[in-house]
Structure formats: structure tokens, C-alpha cells
Amino acid sequence: MPPLRRLAATLLLLAFQAGSAYATPDARAQQEIAALLAFVGQSHCNFIRNGKSYGAEQAQSHLTDKLHYLLRADKVNSAEEFIDRAGTQSSLSGEPYLVVCDGRQQTSAAWLKDELQRLRQGEP
């Protein structure tokens, strides 16, 4: 596992184990969410949130913050819930998050769901 992905996974696991105030997704969900966050951070894509472009590391940090909030509220127990509740749209404006990779724009929801499918199929 690349160092950045290992760090993201370790930090996420620590967040999951931070205390009883957090929801506790099962081990598979924790691994999938950690892998998705690492994927975002290593993507070299631009992320459009509320009309403003952000780099991959900023997007990863934002999604991690949203995840922590959702875990405290017991609203994330699977990778699908993480995507739907944290990675799809702005909680403030309701605008969808967009991802621009190699000149191609798509919704972050579709992009993350495609990556989750690849993860589950064991693709690199």
C-alpha cells in the first residue's frame, strides 16, 4: 500500500475508533471508506464545490471532515452511505460536487461509485 494511502487508512481507522460518540461501520466499510478517501487525495483531479475549484488534498480533507460529522451523528455505516451523504453534494447549498479529471467532468457521486465498484472487483 502506498505511504499516503496507508496514512489515510490509519487516520481514518483512528477516527472510527475515537469513542462511542461515533458510529461504527464494520471493518469492510471502514476499509472501503479509507480507500475512497485515499483515492480522492491521490487523484490529481480538480473538485468543484459551490462553484469553486479545489485540489485533491483539499477535497480529501473536506470529505474527511464531513465523514467525522456524519459518524458522530451515526449517519454512515457503509461506503454507499459515505458517498451519498458526504461525497455527493454541498450540505449548505445542495449543489452537486463535480470532479474534473483529464478534461472530463462528472459528478463526484458517479466518480466515487465507479471507484467503489472497482475496489470491490479487486481492480488496481
Image (cartoon, helix red, strand yellow):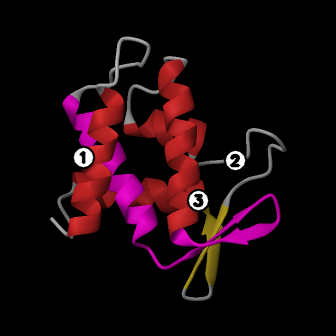
How far from the left and from the top, in percent, is residue 63?
Answer: 54, 48
> Pointer 1 and pointer 2: residues touching (CB < 8 Å)?
no
Residue plotted at (55% across, 18% down)? 73
Identify residue for label 2: 89
Q: Amino acid at mark 3?
A: Ser
How far from the left and from the top, in percent, is residue 86?
Answer: 57, 41
Q: What secondary structure is found at the residue carrying circle 1?
A: helix
Q: What secondary structure is found at the residue carrying circle 3?
A: helix
Q: Quadrant of the N terminus?
A: bottom left
> In the picture shown, does residue 96 fall above or below 83?
below
Q: Which mark is residue 72?
A: none
Give the mark nearest the N terminus, 3 or 2.
Answer: 2
- Residue bounds of the magenta highlight: 27-56
Residue plotted at (78% across, 68% down)? 52
How far from the left and from the top, in percent, is residue 43?
Answer: 44, 74
How far from the left and from the top, in percent, is residue 47?
Answer: 63, 68
Q: Which mark is residue 10?
A: 1
Identify residue for label 3: 108
> Pointer 3 and pointer 2: residues touching (CB < 8 Å)?
no
Q: Which quadrant of the structure image shows residue 17?
A: top left
Residue plotted at (33% across, 20% down)? 24
* Residue 89 visible in the picture: yes
Distance from label 1 to label 2 (Cα)?
A: 26 Å
Give the mark nearest the N terminus, 3 or 1.
Answer: 1
- Pick the residue in front: 22 or 105: 22
> In the picture shown, does residue 65 fall above or below 18?
below
Q: Amino acid at mark 2?
A: Gln
Q: Residue furthest bottom?
A: 103
Q: Which quadrant of the structure image shows residue 66?
A: top right
- Pick the residue in front: 118 or 50: 50
